[in-house]
Image (cartoon, rainbow, N blue to C red):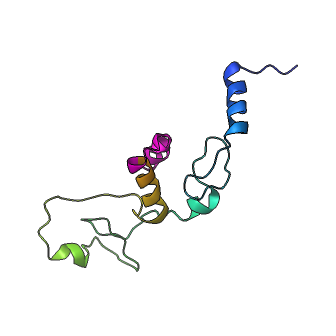
Amino acid sequence: MIALHKSELFQAAVSLLYPATCSICGKRVRAGEYLCEACEAKIVRIVPPFCDTCSEPFEGSMNSAFTCANCAHRTIHFKAAVAAYRGRGVVRDVIHEFKYNRQIHLRYLVARWL
């Protein structure tokens, strides 16, 4: 007979009653996951080249560091802002769910992004 720990048995019962779903679109996902593959694929990671001041991505080829037109003629009261992901689409939706709708379970996903 297969021996299951009480916590594993409890987790199996919970997943039968409350299957894991994508926090954005509601599709079923594996236990412990927060986003489906389709929603995860929509996340845009910021990669060089990007503005040295605000991290705004630049589409094109740059050989050296640059400041975008948005930051160039402004008085900026910070040295730099660094972002790993664009705060739009799925990323924005997850942050809003976590922050405003008190979806505390998303803290693990948000922490992975930091």
Whether 24 is drawn above or below 33: the answer is below
Residue 27 image point, x, y percent: 66, 56
Residue at 80% of width from left, 19% of height from top?
A: 3
In which quadrant will I find the N terminus?
top right
Residue 108 image point, x, y percent: 48, 41
Residue nearest the observer in this picture, 69 or 93:
93
* Residue 87 found in image quarter: bottom left
Residue 91 image point, x, y percent: 45, 59
* Residue 11 found in image quarter: top right
Count of marks overlaid on the render? 0
Residue at 70% of width from left, 37% of height from top?
A: 17
Whether 93 is drawn above or below 64: the answer is above
Residue at 73% of width from left, 38% of height from top?
A: 16
Judge from the rendering whether residue 76 lies leftward or rightward of residue 98; answer left or right. left
Whether residue 66 is in magenta: the answer is no
Q: Which residues are magenta?
A: 99-114
Judge from the rendering whether residue 74 lies leftward or rightward of residue 45; answer left or right. left
* Residue 92 found in image quarter: bottom left
**Furthest-right residue in this view:** 1
Residue 13 image point, x, y percent: 72, 31
Residue at 70% of width from left, 19% of height from top?
A: 6
Whether 32 is drawn above or below 93: the answer is above
User: Principal SS element in the magenta part?
Assistant: helix
